[in-house]
Image (cartoon, rainbow, N blue to C red):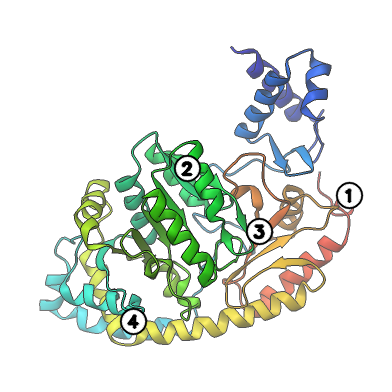
Amino acid sequence: MEDYRIVADEISADVEAGRLRPGDRLPPQRRFARERGIANSTAARVYGELVRRGVVVGEVGRGTFVRAGRPPLEAALAEPGGAKVDLELNFAVLPEQSALVGKALEPLLRDDVLTAALRPGSVTGSKQARDAVAGLLAKDGWTPEILFAGSGREAIAAAIAAFVPMGERLAVEAITYPVVKALAGRLGVQLAPIETDDLGLVPEALAAAHAAAPVRALYVQPTLHNPLGSTMDERRRAELAETVRRMDIPVIEDGIYTFLRPEVRPFATYAPERTVFADSMSKRLAPGLTTGFAAVPPEWTERLAAAVRSGGWVAPRFAVEAATRWITGGILETVERAKRLDAAERQRVTAERLAGFTLRADPQAYHCWWELPEHWRAETFVAAAARRGIAVTPAAAFAIVPGHAPNAVRLAVSSPPLETLAAALDVLAGLASGRPEDAGVD
């Protein structure tokens, strides 16, 4: 076994035996190297191995700490957890929407219509389905081709598979949607983290990363970024469009939350010839209705369609037919309008209950980014919140580079009833105002 792994085993054993406790800080790498009598480069590999195993977590500007809890075995944010109050997974289902959604399905239950809907699905769907989604997304003369997938995640996976060969690099924001990390791992794709600021991805940083080692495509969330909540302004979108044209790379735009900011033009309208816009019904309607769709430049239609088919990501025909009826019948528009009001109210409650803390949140989003007080670490705070029956997500779940996570958590505020949300936020505010040693975290 390589020397650095032996040392990592020893540290792991110290953690298991309780000699190193959750929250303990490891020494700086140079001091660790001197104390162990190993090279600085070996010490760096030890720390990297401990992060990879989930034994420790690094926080920018603070150091490396023993984790407060073991990391989940599955991809973060994939399924609801067991907490009493789930502020980890975003799934907004309004009380009144089930009746609306169900009513639109009644015509599908006619024998002749149902028989047709139960046939195998296709990537292209029917003309009526394509027209319905194209009309839903149309903006400023942008009229892309429409393809269907089983979910928004599957549409993103197909786009990555179509443009980034195994072993090559996909550029992403340095803090990004965790499922993309899992998809890249499954597809054998390397992720190239790109710097962001208050407006989102920095075009100059993307160009510099490409110059250092070529990237084959860019995955980006320009509207209501998850988890940071930022939205690019028009100038930044135009700059990014010019940058990707110079680099001559395709862009995969994650538009899953764009329905909450309908006044904002998708990035695809700035670079329509090279952007795949991925979206689905899961946030617009409900997580159990995951029909996905991709708006694709006409010249890439066959390429994307082949990726969807080969990945086994074709949407069921029944799901596409149902989505079409929700769109054309006005049900989707009604639900989206109600969700925009709901999201605004939840952000108002969040800002009120967490007044005095550092939050980054769009007033129309269903999530916010909480930069914790200096005396708290994200991992310890997550553990303390869990003891009180509240699930929140640490920044490490979103960080591309292990050990480089900000000291922050993401709050998903869409799921609990408003009264429950307010009470949970009060608990978190009280927790953050206190000290970790008073919170009962071992």
Q: Callout 4: few (<14), some (14-19), or many (20+) C-alpha neighbours within 10 Å?
A: few
Q: Callout 1: few (<14), some (14-19), or many (20+) C-alpha neighbours within 10 Å?
A: few
Give the residue type that dot 2 points to. His
As rendered, which of 30 and 66 lies closer to the eye? 30
Identify the residue position indicated by label 3 in the image. Answer: 392
As rendered, which of 264 and 21 lies closer to the eye? 264
In this rendering, the label closer to the viewer, 4 or 2: 2
Give the residue type that dot 4 points to. Gly
Dot placed on the residue nearer the N-terminal end, 4 or 1? 4
Label 4 residue SS: helix
Identify the residue position indicated by label 4 in the image. Answer: 102
Label 3 residue SS: loop
Identify the residue position indicated by label 2 in the image. Answer: 210
Gap between marks 2 and 3 measured at Cα: 34 Å
Q: Which mark is residue 437?
A: 1
As rendered, which of 155 and 12 lies closer to the eye? 155
Give the residue drawn at x 83%, y 17%: 35
Give the residue type that dot 1 points to. Glu
Q: Is residue 86 visible?
A: no
Label 1 residue SS: helix
Gap between marks 4 and 2 measured at Cα: 48 Å
Q: Say above or below: 314 vs 293.
A: above
